[in-house]
Protein backbone atom coordinates (compact mmCIF):
# COMPACT_ATOMS: atom_id res chain seq x y z
CA UNK A 1 0.00 0.00 0.00
CA UNK A 2 1.45 3.36 -1.00
CA UNK A 3 0.89 6.78 0.50
CA UNK A 4 1.28 9.98 -1.50
CA UNK A 5 0.17 13.52 -0.75
CA UNK A 6 -0.72 16.53 -2.90
CA UNK A 7 -1.83 20.08 -2.08
CA UNK A 8 -4.81 21.84 -3.70
CA UNK A 9 -6.71 25.08 -3.32
CA UNK A 10 -10.02 23.23 -3.63
CA UNK A 11 -11.18 19.63 -3.80
CA UNK A 12 -14.57 18.75 -5.30
CA UNK A 13 -16.15 15.40 -4.43
CA UNK A 14 -18.48 14.17 -7.19
CA UNK A 15 -18.50 15.07 -10.89
CA UNK A 16 -22.24 15.46 -11.45
CA UNK A 17 -23.73 18.83 -12.49
CA UNK A 18 -23.13 20.52 -9.12
CA UNK A 19 -19.53 19.36 -8.79
CA UNK A 20 -18.74 20.17 -12.41
CA UNK A 21 -20.20 23.67 -12.09
CA UNK A 22 -18.11 24.39 -8.99
CA UNK A 23 -14.88 22.87 -10.36
CA UNK A 24 -15.04 24.79 -13.66
CA UNK A 25 -15.79 28.12 -11.98
CA UNK A 26 -12.93 27.68 -9.51
CA UNK A 27 -10.46 26.57 -12.21
CA UNK A 28 -11.37 29.45 -14.53
CA UNK A 29 -10.50 31.79 -11.65
CA UNK A 30 -7.01 30.41 -11.22
CA UNK A 31 -7.55 27.92 -8.42
CA UNK A 32 -5.74 24.58 -8.37
CA UNK A 33 -8.62 22.10 -8.28
CA UNK A 34 -8.91 18.33 -7.81
CA UNK A 35 -12.03 16.39 -8.80
CA UNK A 36 -12.56 13.12 -6.92
CA UNK A 37 -15.03 10.80 -8.69
CA UNK A 38 -15.91 7.45 -7.14
CA UNK A 39 -16.93 5.81 -10.41
CA UNK A 40 -14.81 4.94 -13.45
CA UNK A 41 -16.26 7.70 -15.64
CA UNK A 42 -17.11 11.29 -14.81
CA UNK A 43 -20.63 12.71 -15.04
CA UNK A 44 -22.22 11.43 -11.85
CA UNK A 45 -25.69 10.00 -11.45
CA UNK A 46 -27.10 12.56 -13.87
CA UNK A 47 -25.08 11.18 -16.78
CA UNK A 48 -24.97 7.48 -15.92
CA UNK A 49 -28.18 6.50 -14.10
CA UNK A 50 -30.62 9.40 -13.96
CA UNK A 51 -31.35 12.30 -16.27
CA UNK A 52 -29.46 11.33 -19.43
CA UNK A 53 -30.28 7.59 -19.76
CA UNK A 54 -33.93 7.93 -18.73
CA UNK A 55 -34.51 10.80 -21.17
CA UNK A 56 -32.72 8.92 -23.95
CA UNK A 57 -34.96 5.90 -23.27
CA UNK A 58 -38.02 8.13 -23.29
CA UNK A 59 -37.01 9.70 -26.62
CA UNK A 60 -36.64 6.31 -28.31
CA UNK A 61 -39.98 5.08 -27.00
CA UNK A 62 -41.83 8.27 -27.94
CA UNK A 63 -40.43 8.04 -31.48
CA UNK A 64 -41.63 4.42 -31.64
CA UNK A 65 -45.12 5.50 -30.54
CA UNK A 66 -45.03 8.34 -33.07
CA UNK A 67 -44.12 5.90 -35.84
CA UNK A 68 -46.86 3.45 -34.92
CA UNK A 69 -49.54 6.14 -34.72
CA UNK A 70 -48.49 8.20 -37.74
CA UNK A 71 -50.96 7.80 -40.64
CA UNK A 72 -48.04 8.04 -43.09
CA UNK A 73 -46.96 4.52 -42.09
CA UNK A 74 -50.32 2.97 -41.34
CA UNK A 75 -50.54 1.49 -44.83
CA UNK A 76 -47.75 -0.94 -44.01
CA UNK A 77 -50.01 -2.58 -41.40
CA UNK A 78 -46.93 -3.52 -39.40
CA UNK A 79 -46.74 -2.71 -35.68
CA UNK A 80 -43.07 -2.04 -35.09
CA UNK A 81 -41.63 -2.91 -31.70
CA UNK A 82 -38.40 -2.45 -29.79
CA UNK A 83 -37.02 -4.37 -26.83
CA UNK A 84 -35.77 -2.62 -23.70
CA UNK A 85 -32.26 -3.87 -24.54
CA UNK A 86 -32.43 -2.25 -27.99
CA UNK A 87 -33.41 1.16 -26.71
CA UNK A 88 -30.74 0.90 -24.00
CA UNK A 89 -28.10 0.78 -26.77
CA UNK A 90 -29.15 4.28 -27.86
CA UNK A 91 -28.96 5.50 -24.26
CA UNK A 92 -25.46 4.04 -23.83
CA UNK A 93 -24.33 5.85 -26.97
CA UNK A 94 -25.58 9.16 -25.55
CA UNK A 95 -23.82 8.48 -22.22
CA UNK A 96 -20.51 7.83 -24.03
CA UNK A 97 -20.79 11.14 -25.89
CA UNK A 98 -21.59 12.99 -22.66
CA UNK A 99 -18.61 11.45 -20.84
CA UNK A 100 -16.28 12.34 -23.72
CA UNK A 101 -17.58 15.91 -23.83
CA UNK A 102 -17.33 16.46 -20.09
CA UNK A 103 -13.89 14.85 -19.79
CA UNK A 104 -12.71 17.52 -22.22
CA UNK A 105 -13.89 20.26 -19.84
CA UNK A 106 -11.56 19.00 -17.09
CA UNK A 107 -8.60 18.64 -19.44
CA UNK A 108 -9.00 22.10 -20.99
CA UNK A 109 -9.35 23.80 -17.62
CA UNK A 110 -6.48 21.99 -15.95
CA UNK A 111 -8.56 20.22 -13.31
CA UNK A 112 -6.94 17.04 -12.01
CA UNK A 113 -9.29 14.03 -11.83
CA UNK A 114 -8.78 11.07 -9.49
CA UNK A 115 -11.14 8.08 -9.46
CA UNK A 116 -11.70 6.70 -5.98
CA UNK A 117 -13.72 6.99 -2.78
CA UNK A 118 -13.10 10.16 -0.78
CA UNK A 119 -13.34 10.47 3.00
CA UNK A 120 -12.38 13.21 5.43
CA UNK A 121 -9.33 12.88 7.66
CA UNK A 122 -9.95 16.41 8.94
CA UNK A 123 -11.33 19.66 7.50
CA UNK A 124 -8.24 20.17 5.32
CA UNK A 125 -7.15 16.62 4.52
CA UNK A 126 -8.90 13.93 2.49
CA UNK A 127 -8.16 10.27 1.93
CA UNK A 128 -8.85 8.74 -1.50
CA UNK A 129 -9.17 4.97 -1.72
CA UNK A 130 -8.73 3.80 -5.31
CA UNK A 131 -10.14 0.59 -6.81
CA UNK A 132 -6.84 -1.30 -6.39
CA UNK A 133 -6.65 -0.42 -2.69
CA UNK A 134 -4.14 2.40 -3.13
CA UNK A 135 -4.58 5.19 -0.57
CA UNK A 136 -3.80 8.75 -1.57
CA UNK A 137 -3.95 11.73 0.76
CA UNK A 138 -4.56 15.30 -0.37
CA UNK A 139 -4.62 18.56 1.55
CA UNK A 140 -6.80 21.47 0.53
CA UNK A 141 -7.96 24.90 1.59
CA UNK A 142 -11.61 24.28 0.69
CA UNK A 143 -13.90 21.34 -0.14
CA UNK A 144 -17.11 21.04 -2.14
CA UNK A 145 -19.26 17.99 -1.38
CA UNK A 146 -21.29 17.13 -4.50
CA UNK A 147 -21.63 13.39 -3.94
CA UNK A 148 -25.25 13.23 -5.13
CA UNK A 149 -27.93 10.75 -4.12
CA UNK A 150 -29.09 7.21 -4.78
CA UNK A 151 -32.44 5.41 -4.76
CA UNK A 152 -33.82 4.81 -1.25
CA UNK A 153 -33.72 1.14 -0.18
CA UNK A 154 -36.05 0.14 2.66
CA UNK A 155 -34.56 -2.73 4.69
CA UNK A 156 -37.53 -5.07 4.13
CA UNK A 157 -37.15 -5.11 0.32
CA UNK A 158 -34.61 -7.53 -1.20
CA UNK A 159 -32.86 -5.51 -3.88
CA UNK A 160 -30.44 -8.37 -4.54
CA UNK A 161 -33.32 -10.33 -6.12
CA UNK A 162 -32.96 -10.47 -9.91
CA UNK A 163 -36.53 -9.23 -10.49
CA UNK A 164 -36.52 -6.29 -8.02
CA UNK A 165 -34.98 -3.08 -9.40
CA UNK A 166 -34.41 0.54 -8.47
CA UNK A 167 -34.02 3.40 -10.95
CA UNK A 168 -30.26 2.69 -11.21
CA UNK A 169 -30.33 -1.09 -11.62
CA UNK A 170 -33.29 -1.07 -14.03
CA UNK A 171 -30.79 0.13 -16.64
CA UNK A 172 -29.22 -3.36 -16.42
CA UNK A 173 -32.52 -5.12 -17.09
CA UNK A 174 -31.71 -8.15 -19.25
CA UNK A 175 -35.03 -9.99 -19.69
CA UNK A 176 -38.11 -8.69 -21.53
CA UNK A 177 -40.90 -8.33 -18.94
CA UNK A 178 -44.52 -8.54 -20.05
CA UNK A 179 -45.64 -6.80 -16.85
CA UNK A 180 -44.09 -4.52 -14.23
CA UNK A 181 -45.09 -3.02 -10.88
CA UNK A 182 -43.75 0.50 -10.34
CA UNK A 183 -43.86 1.42 -6.66
CA UNK A 184 -43.80 5.18 -6.21
CA UNK A 185 -45.52 7.59 -8.60
CA UNK A 186 -43.19 10.56 -8.32
CA UNK A 187 -41.35 11.98 -11.33
CA UNK A 188 -39.18 8.85 -11.80
CA UNK A 189 -42.11 6.45 -11.39
CA UNK A 190 -44.32 8.33 -13.85
CA UNK A 191 -41.52 8.63 -16.41
CA UNK A 192 -40.77 4.90 -16.32
CA UNK A 193 -44.49 4.08 -16.41
CA UNK A 194 -44.62 5.96 -19.72
CA UNK A 195 -41.51 4.22 -21.03
CA UNK A 196 -42.58 0.67 -20.20
CA UNK A 197 -46.16 1.19 -21.35
CA UNK A 198 -44.83 2.59 -24.63
CA UNK A 199 -42.98 -0.71 -25.08
CA UNK A 200 -46.21 -2.64 -24.60
CA UNK A 201 -45.47 -3.77 -21.04
CA UNK A 202 -48.44 -3.99 -18.64
CA UNK A 203 -47.86 -1.43 -15.87
CA UNK A 204 -49.26 -1.21 -12.34
CA UNK A 205 -48.31 2.22 -10.97
CA UNK A 206 -48.66 2.22 -7.18
CA UNK A 207 -48.97 5.74 -5.75
CA UNK A 208 -48.59 6.39 -2.02
CA UNK A 209 -50.50 9.69 -2.40
CA UNK A 210 -53.98 10.67 -3.57
CA UNK A 211 -53.01 12.03 -6.99
CA UNK A 212 -50.05 11.98 -9.36
CA UNK A 213 -47.35 14.62 -8.92
CA UNK A 214 -49.36 16.69 -6.46
CA UNK A 215 -46.93 19.63 -6.72
CA UNK A 216 -48.19 20.24 -10.27
CA UNK A 217 -51.16 22.36 -11.29
CA UNK A 218 -54.15 20.04 -10.77
CA UNK A 219 -55.31 20.33 -14.39
CA UNK A 220 -51.89 19.13 -15.62
CA UNK A 221 -51.81 16.32 -13.06
CA UNK A 222 -55.29 15.23 -14.16
CA UNK A 223 -54.21 15.29 -17.81
CA UNK A 224 -51.25 13.02 -17.05
CA UNK A 225 -53.50 10.61 -15.12
CA UNK A 226 -55.95 10.50 -18.03
CA UNK A 227 -53.31 9.83 -20.67
CA UNK A 228 -51.51 7.17 -18.61
CA UNK A 229 -54.81 5.40 -17.95
CA UNK A 230 -55.86 5.85 -21.56
CA UNK A 231 -52.66 4.09 -22.66
CA UNK A 232 -53.43 1.17 -20.34
CA UNK A 233 -51.50 1.98 -17.16
CA UNK A 234 -53.32 0.86 -13.99
CA UNK A 235 -52.88 3.60 -11.35
CA UNK A 236 -53.51 2.69 -7.71
CA UNK A 237 -53.66 5.74 -5.40
CA UNK A 238 -53.26 5.89 -1.61
CA UNK A 239 -51.51 2.54 -1.39
CA UNK A 240 -48.56 1.47 0.79
CA UNK A 241 -46.78 -1.85 0.44
CA UNK A 242 -47.08 -4.38 3.26
CA UNK A 243 -44.58 -6.76 1.64
CA UNK A 244 -42.61 -7.18 -1.58
CA UNK A 245 -41.47 -10.74 -2.33
CA UNK A 246 -39.45 -11.95 -5.29
CA UNK A 247 -40.26 -15.37 -6.77
CA UNK A 248 -38.49 -17.51 -9.39
CA UNK A 249 -40.31 -15.82 -12.24
CA UNK A 250 -41.70 -12.57 -10.83
CA UNK A 251 -42.64 -10.38 -7.88
CA UNK A 252 -45.66 -10.29 -5.55
CA UNK A 253 -46.59 -7.00 -3.86
CA UNK A 254 -49.09 -7.04 -1.01
CA UNK A 255 -50.59 -3.68 -0.11
CA UNK A 256 -51.61 -2.50 3.36
CA UNK A 257 -55.20 -2.44 2.04
CA UNK A 258 -55.03 -6.16 1.24
CA UNK A 259 -54.48 -6.08 -2.53
CA UNK A 260 -52.20 -8.67 -4.14
CA UNK A 261 -50.40 -7.45 -7.27
CA UNK A 262 -48.28 -9.83 -9.34
CA UNK A 263 -45.89 -8.95 -12.18
CA UNK A 264 -42.74 -10.17 -13.93
CA UNK A 265 -40.64 -7.56 -12.09
CA UNK A 266 -40.82 -4.52 -9.83
CA UNK A 267 -39.24 -1.07 -10.00
CA UNK A 268 -38.99 0.58 -6.59
CA UNK A 269 -39.03 4.34 -7.23
CA UNK A 270 -40.02 5.84 -3.90
CA UNK A 271 -37.49 8.33 -2.54
CA UNK A 272 -33.75 9.00 -2.61
CA UNK A 273 -30.94 9.15 -0.03
CA UNK A 274 -27.84 11.34 -0.01
CA UNK A 275 -24.48 9.64 -0.67
CA UNK A 276 -22.96 10.60 2.67
CA UNK A 277 -21.92 7.39 4.46
CA UNK A 278 -18.43 6.91 2.99
CA UNK A 279 -17.38 10.55 3.44
CA UNK A 280 -16.76 10.26 7.22
CA UNK A 281 -18.24 13.74 7.74
CA UNK A 282 -18.43 13.06 11.49
CA UNK A 283 -14.66 13.65 11.59
CA UNK A 284 -15.26 17.31 10.70
CA UNK A 285 -18.35 17.72 12.88
CA UNK A 286 -21.03 17.60 10.16
CA UNK A 287 -24.33 15.86 10.90
CA UNK A 288 -26.54 14.82 7.95
CA UNK A 289 -30.30 14.59 8.38
CA UNK A 290 -32.24 11.30 8.23
CA UNK A 291 -32.15 11.43 4.40
CA UNK A 292 -28.36 11.77 4.35
CA UNK A 293 -28.51 15.45 3.39
CA UNK A 294 -26.49 18.41 4.67
CA UNK A 295 -27.75 21.82 5.79
CA UNK A 296 -26.14 24.78 4.02
CA UNK A 297 -26.28 28.58 3.97
CA UNK A 298 -27.45 30.73 1.04
CA UNK A 299 -23.87 30.44 -0.25
CA UNK A 300 -23.94 26.62 0.09
CA UNK A 301 -21.57 26.75 3.06
CA UNK A 302 -21.94 24.05 5.71
CA UNK A 303 -21.43 24.63 9.42
CA UNK A 304 -17.70 24.12 8.75
CA UNK A 305 -16.66 27.34 7.02
CA UNK A 306 -14.19 25.68 4.58
CA UNK A 307 -16.64 22.97 3.47
CA UNK A 308 -19.47 23.60 1.00
CA UNK A 309 -22.15 21.32 -0.47
CA UNK A 310 -24.32 21.45 -3.60
CA UNK A 311 -26.72 19.26 -5.58
CA UNK A 312 -28.77 16.32 -4.33
CA UNK A 313 -26.73 16.09 -1.12
CA UNK A 314 -28.50 19.25 0.14
CA UNK A 315 -31.99 18.19 -1.00
CA UNK A 316 -34.45 20.54 -2.73
CA UNK A 317 -34.76 21.17 -5.62
CA UNK A 318 -32.70 18.08 -6.65
CA UNK A 319 -32.58 19.11 -10.30
CA UNK A 320 -29.57 18.80 -12.60
CA UNK A 321 -30.33 22.25 -14.04
CA UNK A 322 -30.33 23.88 -10.60
CA UNK A 323 -27.23 21.95 -9.47
CA UNK A 324 -25.09 23.55 -12.21
CA UNK A 325 -26.14 26.98 -10.94
CA UNK A 326 -25.59 25.96 -7.31
CA UNK A 327 -22.04 24.90 -8.22
CA UNK A 328 -21.25 28.23 -9.86
CA UNK A 329 -22.79 30.27 -7.02
CA UNK A 330 -20.96 28.16 -4.44
CA UNK A 331 -17.61 28.60 -6.26
CA UNK A 332 -18.09 32.38 -6.47
CA UNK A 333 -18.71 32.50 -2.71
CA UNK A 334 -15.60 30.36 -2.14
CA UNK A 335 -13.53 32.77 -4.25
CA UNK A 336 -14.86 36.07 -2.93
CA UNK A 337 -16.60 35.31 0.36
CA UNK A 338 -19.95 36.35 -1.09
CA UNK A 339 -22.09 35.93 -4.21
CA UNK A 340 -24.93 38.23 -5.21
CA UNK A 341 -26.37 35.68 -7.62
CA UNK A 342 -29.04 33.33 -6.30
CA UNK A 343 -31.03 30.50 -7.80
CA UNK A 344 -34.00 32.02 -9.61
CA UNK A 345 -37.17 31.85 -7.53
CA UNK A 346 -39.19 30.22 -10.32
CA UNK A 347 -37.18 27.17 -11.39
CA UNK A 348 -38.86 25.39 -14.32
CA UNK A 349 -39.71 21.72 -13.91
CA UNK A 350 -39.31 19.34 -16.83
CA UNK A 351 -41.02 15.96 -16.45
CA UNK A 352 -40.26 13.59 -19.30
CA UNK A 353 -43.36 11.45 -19.30
CA UNK A 354 -45.16 10.68 -22.58
CA UNK A 355 -46.55 13.29 -23.21
CA UNK A 356 -44.04 15.67 -21.62
CA UNK A 357 -44.83 18.15 -18.81
CA UNK A 358 -43.20 21.44 -17.88
CA UNK A 359 -44.24 24.26 -15.61
CA UNK A 360 -42.89 27.44 -14.03
CA UNK A 361 -44.38 29.78 -11.44
CA UNK A 362 -47.62 29.49 -9.50
CA UNK A 363 -50.36 26.90 -9.90
CA UNK A 364 -54.08 27.72 -9.90
CA UNK A 365 -54.40 26.15 -6.47
CA UNK A 366 -51.64 28.35 -5.00
CA UNK A 367 -53.10 31.54 -6.49
CA UNK A 368 -56.57 30.68 -5.24
CA UNK A 369 -55.25 30.00 -1.72
CA UNK A 370 -53.37 33.33 -1.81
CA UNK A 371 -56.53 35.13 -3.02
CA UNK A 372 -54.74 36.53 -6.07
CA UNK A 373 -57.22 37.74 -8.75
CA UNK A 374 -55.93 35.75 -11.69
CA UNK A 375 -57.27 34.68 -15.05
CA UNK A 376 -56.39 31.78 -17.35
CA UNK A 377 -55.44 31.74 -21.02
CA UNK A 378 -55.36 28.38 -22.82
CA UNK A 379 -54.17 27.07 -26.16
CA UNK A 380 -54.96 23.52 -27.28
CA UNK A 381 -52.17 21.95 -29.33
CA UNK A 382 -54.71 20.31 -31.65
CA UNK A 383 -55.60 23.78 -32.97
CA UNK A 384 -52.00 24.66 -33.93
CA UNK A 385 -50.91 24.14 -37.52
CA UNK A 386 -47.45 22.86 -36.49
CA UNK A 387 -49.02 20.25 -34.20
CA UNK A 388 -51.34 19.14 -37.00
CA UNK A 389 -48.42 18.85 -39.42
CA UNK A 390 -46.35 16.76 -36.97
CA UNK A 391 -49.41 14.82 -35.75
CA UNK A 392 -48.61 15.87 -32.14
CA UNK A 393 -52.15 16.84 -31.22
CA UNK A 394 -52.18 15.94 -27.53
CA UNK A 395 -51.51 18.77 -25.10
CA UNK A 396 -52.07 22.36 -24.17
CA UNK A 397 -50.42 25.51 -22.88
CA UNK A 398 -51.93 27.37 -19.94
CA UNK A 399 -50.94 30.90 -18.89
CA UNK A 400 -52.00 32.26 -15.48
CA UNK A 401 -51.91 36.06 -15.21
CA UNK A 402 -53.08 38.84 -12.89
CA UNK A 403 -56.43 40.25 -14.02
CA UNK A 404 -55.46 43.86 -13.28
CA UNK A 405 -51.72 44.18 -13.95
CA UNK A 406 -51.59 41.45 -16.65
CA UNK A 407 -48.43 40.10 -14.97
CA UNK A 408 -47.70 36.47 -15.92
CA UNK A 409 -47.84 34.41 -12.71
CA UNK A 410 -47.49 30.85 -13.92
CA UNK A 411 -47.15 28.80 -17.10
CA UNK A 412 -48.07 25.12 -17.42
CA UNK A 413 -47.54 22.99 -20.50
CA UNK A 414 -48.51 19.41 -21.29
CA UNK A 415 -47.50 17.81 -24.57
CA UNK A 416 -44.55 17.04 -26.81
CA UNK A 417 -41.62 19.52 -26.43
CA UNK A 418 -43.20 21.07 -23.31
CA UNK A 419 -39.80 21.44 -21.61
CA UNK A 420 -38.58 23.55 -24.57
CA UNK A 421 -41.78 25.55 -25.01
CA UNK A 422 -41.82 26.65 -21.34
CA UNK A 423 -38.64 28.74 -21.69
CA UNK A 424 -40.30 31.39 -23.85
CA UNK A 425 -42.77 32.18 -21.10
CA UNK A 426 -40.08 31.85 -18.42
CA UNK A 427 -38.01 34.55 -20.15
CA UNK A 428 -40.95 36.98 -19.96
CA UNK A 429 -41.72 36.09 -16.34
CA UNK A 430 -38.13 36.92 -15.38
CA UNK A 431 -38.46 40.50 -16.72
CA UNK A 432 -38.79 43.03 -13.95
CA UNK A 433 -41.34 45.82 -13.70
CA UNK A 434 -43.53 46.39 -16.76
CA UNK A 435 -41.58 43.85 -18.83
CA UNK A 436 -43.61 40.91 -17.50
CA UNK A 437 -47.05 41.12 -19.10
CA UNK A 438 -49.21 38.67 -21.00
CA UNK A 439 -49.72 41.35 -23.66
CA UNK A 440 -46.16 40.71 -24.89
CA UNK A 441 -47.37 37.46 -26.46
CA UNK A 442 -50.05 39.30 -28.42
CA UNK A 443 -47.85 42.20 -29.54
CA UNK A 444 -44.85 40.16 -30.72
CA UNK A 445 -44.71 38.17 -33.97
CA UNK A 446 -44.07 34.42 -33.77
CA UNK A 447 -42.82 32.23 -36.58
CA UNK A 448 -45.66 30.36 -38.28
CA UNK A 449 -46.24 27.46 -38.08
CA UNK A 450 -44.58 26.77 -34.72
CA UNK A 451 -45.48 25.32 -31.34
CA UNK A 452 -44.39 28.66 -29.81
CA UNK A 453 -47.43 30.22 -31.43
CA UNK A 454 -49.40 28.62 -28.57
CA UNK A 455 -48.38 31.64 -26.46
CA UNK A 456 -50.20 34.05 -28.78
CA UNK A 457 -53.30 31.84 -28.88
CA UNK A 458 -53.31 31.41 -25.07
CA UNK A 459 -52.72 35.14 -24.46
CA UNK A 460 -55.61 36.15 -26.71
CA UNK A 461 -57.82 33.54 -25.06
CA UNK A 462 -56.99 34.91 -21.60
CA UNK A 463 -57.34 38.60 -22.47
CA UNK A 464 -60.73 37.89 -24.05
CA UNK A 465 -61.88 36.58 -20.65
CA UNK A 466 -60.84 39.82 -18.96
CA UNK A 467 -62.52 42.02 -21.55
Image (cartoon, helix red, strand yellow):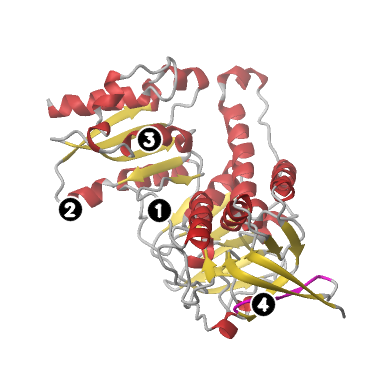
For the residues marked 1 and 3, what is the alpha-carbon distance in whole angstroms?
17 Å
For the residues marked 4 and 3, what is the alpha-carbon distance in whole angstroms?
43 Å
Judged left or right of residue 352, residue 176 is right
In the picture, the disc for residue 370 is: 2
In the picture, the disc for residue 342 is: 1
Determine the secondary structure under disc 4. Answer: strand
In the picture, the disc for residue 125 is: 4
Determine the secondary structure under disc 2. Answer: loop
In the picture, the disc for residue 427 is: 3
Which picture quadrant has residue 431?
top left
Q: Nearer the viewer, mark 4 or mark 2?
A: 4
Dot 2, crowdedness within 10 Å: few (<14), some or many (≥20)? Answer: few
Task: Find out whether residue 125 is within the magenta segment.
Answer: yes
Judged left or right of residue 209, residue 166 is right
- The mark that comes first in sequence, 4 or 2, is 4
Q: Which residues are magenta?
A: 123-131
Which picture quadrant has residue 418?
top left
For this rendering, which residue is in front, 374 or 193? 374
Amino acid sequence: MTKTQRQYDAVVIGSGPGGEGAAMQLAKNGRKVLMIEKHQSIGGGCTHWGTIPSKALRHSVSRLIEYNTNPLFSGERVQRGLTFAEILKHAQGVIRKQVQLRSGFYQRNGVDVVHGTASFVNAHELQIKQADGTLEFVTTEQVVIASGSRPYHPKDVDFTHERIYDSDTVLDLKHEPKSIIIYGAGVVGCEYASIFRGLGVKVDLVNTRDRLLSFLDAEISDALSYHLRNSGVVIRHNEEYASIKGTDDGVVLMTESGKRIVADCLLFANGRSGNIEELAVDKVGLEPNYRGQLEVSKHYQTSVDTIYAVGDIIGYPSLASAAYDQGRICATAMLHGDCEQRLISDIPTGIYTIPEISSVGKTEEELTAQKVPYEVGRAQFKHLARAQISNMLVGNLKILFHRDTKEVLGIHCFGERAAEIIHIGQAIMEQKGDGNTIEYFVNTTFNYPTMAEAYRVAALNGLNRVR
